[in-house]
Amino acid sequence: MNLTFLGHACFLLDDGTCRVLTDPYLTENPLAPVKPDKVEADYICVTHGHGDHIGDTAQIARRTGARICCPVELGSAVFAPQGLDTIPANLGGTCKLPFGSVKLVPALHGSGVPGCLSCGFLFEIGGKKIYHAGDTALISDMALLAEEDIDVALLPIGNVYTMGPKDALRAVKMIRPKLVVPMHYNTFPLIVQDPNAFAEAVIASGFQAAVLEPGQTFSL
């Protein structure tokens, strides 16, 4: 089970059979290590409708045939009108897919699409549980994730648009994952953060953390 960081909130989850891509913001991301025409995916999971999360979803889906999993209103408003294959779901719902499953979990953030909610994703893939928080503030619902025995939590730390390092550390203490990987930082001047300092704080609190450079793969 490989986890590759492609910058911002974009990760590629690969269990050797299925490739799952999240929030593929690549073309306009100065830190992205690859262009969208070099990324392969079977599924693309999009947390909400802001441009730095929709990103290159349509281009990649057309080329690869990937199905798009996202909140139902986002699919109806953005992807279905383009003739793309969507998997409509909503908060609390779990989609059973060939690699395992993906559950849409709450995130507190603007959606970018009227009437739509933002979400995070809880993946079961390759025998692991991976939580992608999406763009979110710190929310008390994260405490419920402690019951999930999460292997990896992908948490935003950029501040301004999402929770910052201090609130992300509070989230770690609620979620209690085996490993924490920071995301959504340093892409823009307003969200510049020190991921290594965050990782040190996570470790000092009794948890494990890994800072991935864009393009780096972590094997679980």
Image: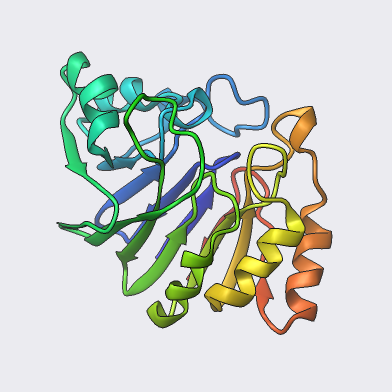
The residue nearer to you, when weighing 95 against 209, is 95
- Residue at the image point whose x is 53% and y is 20% from the top: 27
- Residue at the image point whose x is 40% and y is 54% from the top: 106
Apparent side of residue 56 relative to residue 127 in the rendered image (left or right): right
Outermost residue toward the top? Answer: 82
The residue nearer to you, when weighing 87 against 28, is 87
- Residue at the image point whose x is 59% and y is 44% from the top: 215
Q: Position of residue 21 (x, y in %)?
A: 38, 43
The residue nearer to you, when weighing 15 against 100, is 100
Where is 195 relative to 52, above or below? below
Apparent side of residue 196 relative to residue 141 in the rendered image (left or right): right
Apparent side of residue 84 relative to residue 185 in the rendered image (left or right): left
Where is 108 relative to 127, above or below? above
Q: Position of residue 213 (x, y in %)?
A: 68, 48
Which quadrant: the N terminus? bottom left
Quadrant hosting residue 171: bottom right
Q: Position of residue 97 (x, y in %)?
A: 16, 56
Looking at the image, how many numbered discs can be counted on the residues? 0
Q: Position of residue 164 (x, y in %)?
A: 72, 51
Quadrant hosting residue 173: bottom right
Colouring convention used in this rendered image of the protein: rainbow
Where is 133 relative to 59, above or below? below
Apparent side of residue 212 relative to residue 142 in the rendered image (left or right): right
- Residue at the image point whose x is 29% and y is 52% from the top: 91
